[in-house]
Image (cartoon, rainbow, N blue to C red):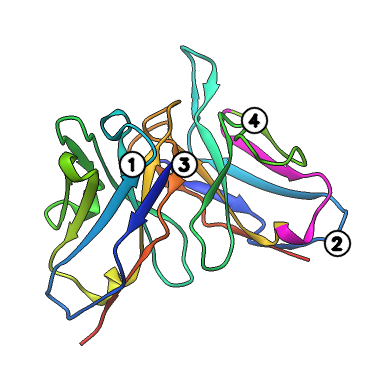
Amino acid sequence: QVQLVQSGAEVKKPGASVKVSCKASGYIFNSYYLHWVRQAPGQGLEWMGIINPSGGSTTYAQKLQGRLTMTRDTSASTFYMELSRLSSEDTAVYYCARASYWNNYLMDVWGQGTTVTVSS
Amino acid sequence: DIVMTQSPDSLAVSLGERATINCKSSQSVLYSSNNMNYLAWYQQKPGQPPKLLIYWASTRESGVPDRFSGSGSGTDFTLTISSLQAEDVAVYYCHQYYSTPSTFGQGTKLEI
């Protein structure tokens, strides 16, 4: 079955960077775009960006431009999300989500989430 | 950016009763060339990722019970649960995928 398995929880200090992985299985890796979405504690969902696994092109949310980098390793069927210059406002659960067959911006399968805590 | 506004923020419904959640977009998410509304609904239970329920405003995702239905067009949309079950307690989000950045409503907490 289609699965996205994310790396474990992270605790980082302000100003540091974090890199979260998302391993895909059960489908053709290069055929579906991949999103990252985050959710601050007790808050709603915030779209961060999207990556095309075939070629690696990306589109990021404007507010995260300059701090966010999305990459992929096709040989390992794994996506990565790196966020730099962390602040307490980046404390959140980070999800990867596969784009649907029907539309590249519709998300049909989600990873389990990775908690990132930014604290001094 | 398209702003998605849900109402109410929270809702308490008795088991077996109907639940209705509304979502309004700040601009139309109806694409005229194909007459499709780029609007989805997700369900999120505590400690879990969101689960896709409805897309194209009214198409149920495979495996979603038929008590869940979506309706609306343009800027006004509704998610209806026809007969509330205990397992439907969750937060529900609407989501527009019409334009970038993709945006979500603030969520509606559904309780019994």
Which quadrant of the rendered structure holds the N terminus of chain B?
A: top left
Residue placed under numbered mark 1 in the picture: B101
Q: Earlier in the sequence, mark 1 or mark 2?
A: 2
Percent position (x, y) of residue B91?
60, 59
Residue placed under numbered mark 3 in the picture: A1
Three-letter amino acid code at the position of disc 3: Gln
Q: Nearer the viewer, mark 2 or mark 3?
A: 3
- Examine the rendering and report whether any part of residue B30 can be seen: yes
Give the magenta range. Answer: B74-87
Dot 2 and dot 3 within a common chain: no
Q: Is residue A47 left or right of residue B109?
A: left
Q: Which mark is residue B14?
A: 2
Q: Secondary structure at mark 4?
A: loop
Q: Is residue B17 left or right of residue A68?
A: right
Q: Is residue B36 left or right of residue B9?
A: left
Residue placed under numbered mark 4 in the picture: B58
Three-letter amino acid code at the position of disc 1: Pro
